[in-house]
Amino acid sequence: MKKFIYIVAAASTLALGSCSKWLDVNENPNSANTTVPTAVQRLPPILAQFADGYESAGTRASFITQQLAVVNANSNNWNLTRWNLTNAAVGWPWQAWYVNTAVNIQPMIDAADKVGANHYVGVGKIIKAWGFGYMVDCYGILPYDEFDNKDILTPKFDDGEYIYGKVLPLLDEAILDLSKAQDQYAPSLKEGDTYNGGDVQKWIKLAYGLKARFLNHYSKKANYNPDEILSLLAKAPSSSIDGTTYQYVDEGKDVSDNSKAALQWANTGTTARITKLYYDYITNNYTGAPTGANNMVDPRLDLLVPSMDNGKGVLMRSKVVDMQSSLPATGPVAVTFNEKNNQFSHVDSVYISLRSNTAASTGRVLSTGTWYTRKGGKGLLLTGAEMKFIEAEIRFKKGQLALALQAYKDGIKIHMEIMGVASGDLTKFLESTSVVQDASKLTLSQIMIQKYIALSYSQEQWADLRRMDFCTDASGNYNEAIGIYKGFNRPSHVFANSFPNPTDWPRRFAIASYENSYNLDQVKKADPDAGSPTYITKPVFWDKK
């Protein structure tokens, strides 16, 4: 009997061993784990989560750069408009990058490597480089070397300059991977690519464009190399069709789930409003703006600034919020609309919501919305317009004024084409005196303000303001005569705890609350000032002179 039991037990052990070995080779594709999903399955959510974090950082930057105001409320967005960059206000880009995106990139690259899908490897490297690059621009210091080590619960923070030194070569690697042929049975990039539809050349141009963008951030540094950037721009996007955008999906006005609406539709909510500064830039109402006998209204105006039916069938553009006035401390107030009496609850209804809205019973247009916030809109991740403005900046500084003027005009043109401005209106505007026509009269301010418009809802808008030192003189004081961003001054309700001096300006996000709560020792090791209220006035590495 004992012998029989022993034999059965041995047989069972052999059977289990064989089963275990079989399972090691044949994993259940219906059971979630870290190895089963293919590169094709992994890439779309990576791209979606990246766009969420990237565009959300852009929304936050738009409140800081005074593109957007907010109805008065004790909210994160309202705090951003007063430059109170609270841990909670700036935490989401951190989570969207680290938790939702970054940790999934290497597994995708590994899965792609197994099947010789070189193009997926290249895309993975671009997203990694891009993500860490823009996060450095926002936060200054980050976990990089140890961020995805499962054995380290409190990863060290790395300096931004060190991280840039890692991501720039990563873009070079990505270009090489994308230039390789794929293995015979490797999946086509088109199967998983929701940005560029599998167009490998667009991804290669994106890599060159990102490298040009990041290297242009060095404009205050001794190692700034404008000629190298120009050589990169020659291989980067240069038209309205070869940039990288994320097309959101409009499921229809009657669909309650807005998860696929344009991200800025969700991020700006019902509380965001247009500022006077943004409106003045679009309408050329700033010191030194181009003007003349043949002025023309910018065809983008009604795409960027919402309007409302005034109750008499006439569309009226939104009133705009002057951030240097006393208004932002107490208003505008939030309003409601009563369809029964066809009236708003408060006169501040003239400050119109950025979300399109129509009264269901009467059809009265309560807001036309904006191009960036409409459902089914596009996320402009990196465009030919941005590249042209970088070129215009460099050419201008090199004294190549005719080339600078052409690049400046090309940047305006490409942005208008992306927005769908009619070609006839576009041509008339570019030939009008609302655009500089004489190269000898072109200024850096005019270039950067047009770039500001083209980079609406982008954290690159904030990067540029920092590189150009806002609208200040060498001492850091506001000076409209020599400053670049004319009219950009400290908000009237500025958060005095963080900005006690007139020379204090917003230079970085605060460290996300997750790190302060669970990794504070490493934060302090990287920068002992990280807990100070004035930490956000401390320049990131490329912003230091």
Image (tube, rainbow, N blue to C red):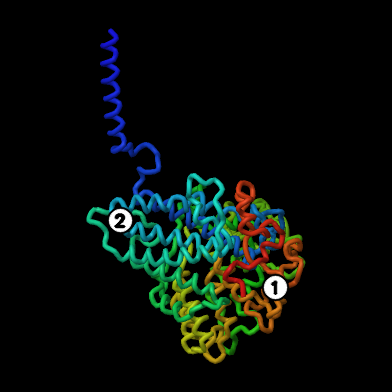
Q: Position of residue 379 (x, y in %)?
A: 48, 62
Query: At 76% from the left edge and 63% from the top edge, which residue is drawn?
Result: 496
SS class, disc 1? loop
Rendered location of residue 495, percent (x, y): 74, 62
Query: Residue 249, percent across and down?
Result: 44, 55
Residue 489: image tag:
1
Mark 2: few/some/many CA within 10 Å (<14, 14-19, 20+): many
Image quarter in which the C terminus is found: bottom right
Of 172 and 263, the residue lying toward us: 172
Label 2 vs label 1, nearer the camera: 2
Q: Quadrant of the N terminus?
A: top left
According to the image, label 2 marks what residue? 117
Residue 529 falls in which quadrant of the image? bottom right
Amino acid type at mark 2: Ala
Foreground residue among 455 and 419: 455
Residue 279 located left or right of residue 494: left
Q: Is residue 478 left or right of residue 270?
A: right
Above or below: residue 523 compared with residue 62: above
Q: CA distance from mark 2 to mark 1?
A: 50 Å
Q: Nearer the viewer, residue 335 or 51?
A: 51
Q: Residue at x 49, y 72 (%)?
A: 215
- Element at label 2: loop
Q: State the image coordinates of residue 351 (x, y, percent, origin top left).
A: 67, 63
